[in-house]
Image (cartoon, rainbow, N blue to C red):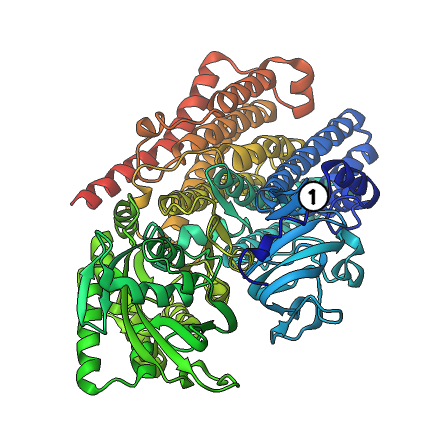
Amino acid sequence: MTGNDYFNSSIQGLTTAQAQLLQQQWGFNVIQSNTSHRWLKKLWGTVKEPMFVLLSIACLLYFILGNTWEGSVMSVALLIISAISLYQEIKSDKAMSRLVKLSATKINVIRDGRVQSLDEEALVPGDIIQLEEGMTIPADVVVLQFNDLTINESAITGESLPVDKTEKAGSNKLYQGTTINSGKCVARVTATGNHTVLGKVGKAVMAYHPAITPLQRQVNTFVKRMSFFGMAGFAILFFTNLFRGIDLPNSLLFALTLAMSAIPEEIPVAFSSFMALGAYKLSKRGIICRRPQMMESLGEISVLCFDKTGTLTQNEMEVAWVYDHATYQLVECTHTPSVAANVIRYAKLASEQQPFDAMEIAIGNQYLHYNDAAFDNAAMIHEYPLGGTPPMMTHVYTLHNQTMAAAKGAVERIIRVCKLSGAHQNMISGIATGLANKGCRVLGVAYAVHDHQNFPENQDDYHWQLAGLLALYDPPKPGVASSIAHFTKAGIAVKMLTGDHGATAVTIGKKVGISQNNTFYTGQQVMDMDEDALNKAVQTEAIFARMFPEAKLRVITALKKNGQLIGMTGDGVNDAPALQAADIGIAMGRRGTGTAQQAADLIVTDDQLEHMVTAIEEGRKVLSNFKKALRYILSIHIPIILTAAIPVIAGWQYANVFGPVHVIFLELIMGPTCSLFFENEPAEEGIMHLPPIRQGGTIMTKREMAVSVSQGLVIASTLLGTYYVLMQQNAGVAITRTMVFITLLLCNLFLTFVNRSFVHSFFTTLHYKNNLIPVIVSASLLLITVLLFIPPVQHLFMMTTLNPIQIFICIVLAFISISWIEVYKKIRRYKTSQ
């Protein structure tokens, strides 16, 4: 298939009415998984959680002891906590579903005699679709028309070598999930959804099973350690109470109180919620995060590797200069100099007849000024796809009653195949470097007359003659320099990995602020370096030119070995290995191929680099807020555990003031605070001026751990001190329990607000917008009021009414035990300013 045959106007495709009927018959083009037991699995996942098991045992013990009212209330509370957990899961799942829909691929479908862009799930058997290089086949199809078509069928066969395809029987079937390695085609859909080969053999991914990230591993370890301490405390309290003469059910009940208070069951739920909702928020801003766990990596990213064309530049090229080797003239194309005619014509012959690459479109536009009937009517009889290092491509035509080959490619390659003399090589290289220094992409153009019937196996083997050079200018995108400056301020190293000439890369690098040096490494130099030399090179150099897939992959691997977390942009089939090797693969939504987008973790839908600034800021915000939630949970669990354990171990008069009902009440407050309030926090001021979090570090630094543990210990000391003084004054167990519990609730409320930042003061964070602040404050005060003044609730919690002075004492004690952190923040700000 050549020329305009790519879409033959005689192909009408289905009508809309026919497509609707076929969709009713065959359904959507989606491989359906068995979701009938999904809700049961979610329910079972909640039931087997340690907290659910402990609460269920506590409920049972209350009923055994005859405390029907307490048991009933505990049962209701158990249902509420389970509902909150399920709500968070459902919320995360909905965010994931929206992300899947947003990342759906658009397919050009011929319906009603015209090309329409539809979601791939809308395809039905009989649809006529257009496919091209880099796309993943959306359904089983047969080829109707093709051009240079090869397919990677590894998704079906496991064989990675590309397979040639034609419209002939036996080689015309393409299967869903395979990838177009090269070329393009028009094809008819034969099967969709579960009726495809992929659907029948069950190789599609039915459920999302992401790999466990470093942060997830640290969270799981943290939860396991806390659970271990809880179980150890359970054993100690259980046997201590038994030894002191408390009956078995009550000993078990009080021991369960400690175990329940130690298990931070909010944390895993919070992690999933933070990541999924963060990814969904990004999607609304034009960045599709295909794996929510990548939010973690976005917050830790330390190196960004960009290609040049279309990412840093506008990908809107125009031919700026032409060098004609026949006349040795270099001319600027501000007008249409006749001396440029042959170079432009041969460059056009060496381009795709239906170009989609910006460079070839620019050549085609320039050719309109030099069109020639003989060149227009030349029939292509053979072609060599873009290949080699550095690359070139060749088309062979019948032209002027002879066989003529036209090639274009990297200047170094064209010089080599033309076998120029040393003097001419130096001259052409000098001209090319001069044009590259202007920021132009420079191509060599050559032609050859072929006198033999058979075509050479290798395109280098023609008797090439140099036609000249083309210099195409692609200006930097507006705003790119500002984005690069943001990355630099955030401590993120920026590197350019491009296939362009080194001088071109250096010039563009200077314009956008990547590097002010004139140095660069080439792909071949990268491949020739030993490991130690490469590790040093990737640390010090920002520009890598004449890069090819293997060289890009080696640079990414070396950066990762140096302990960096890498983001890599790419748009072509050949970029897929580097995108997969990077910690975060980033594809462009408009110009990226299907293969690149499938290999990527992030898709920037409008190709605007400033959205990467947004993505990294959101990633840092998610990590920062999750850490705040984690530190809050750690700080508030410590006083609960110690207040439940120390009086029993020390043999105090009022040994067991907290029971399961108190702990479950706290869980009803702490769960939403952890998962909802902190997730809703805005990014802190200056978050993009901080260095990236180092990959592989602990979930909290030693300083952060020390501060959070200190917060918990100070609160615990306040509660235990109050506990002890009241006990010594024989205030009674009801007054003691009430004052300690109310003080703890107030500490929890104050802690929520001071933990909004560990740098900025409470008064600064009051200006941070969080719509849940009124909810948290109102709910906390309402619950305290109910506990203090509603008799049935007081009876349930075994508490009593406090007088105004006692309430005031609780407020003062809570304020003092929390407010010291503000002094720490001020000292830290002072040291930072110095």
Left or right: 289 in relation to 191: left
Seen from the viewer's position, the closer of residues 209 and 474 is: 474
Q: Quadrant of residue 767?
A: top left
Question: Where's the N terminus, which quadrant?
Answer: bottom right
| Image vertical order of residue 370 relative to residue 394, above or below | above
Residue drawn at x 48%, y 54% is 592
Residue 251 appears in the picture as rendered: no
Q: Residue 41: image x %, image y %?
A: 77, 47
Q: Residue 127: image x %, image y %?
A: 72, 48
Give the amino acid type for the residue marked by disc 1 in the picture.
Ala
Left or right: 583 in relation to 663: left
Question: Where's the C terminus, which quadrant?
Answer: top left
Seen from the viewer's position, the closer of residues 732 and 44 is: 44
Q: Residue 673: image x %, image y %?
A: 53, 33
How packed mark 1 is, by other alpha carbons closer than 10 Å (few <14, some 14-19, many 20 or more), is some
Residue behind mark 1: 122
Q: Residue 744: image x %, image y %?
A: 51, 30
Secondary element at tag 1? helix
Residue drawn at x 63%, y 31% is 662
Q: Quadrant of residue 811?
A: top left
Seen from the viewer's position, the closer of residues 679 and 222 is: 679
Seen from the viewer's position, the closer of residues 261 and 619 is: 619
Residue drawn at x 62%, y 69% is 152
Residue 345 appears in the picture as rendered: yes
Left or right: 399 in relation to 270: left
| Image vertical order of residue 824 relative to residue 183, above or below | above
User: How many numbered badges does the structure rendering display?
Assistant: 1
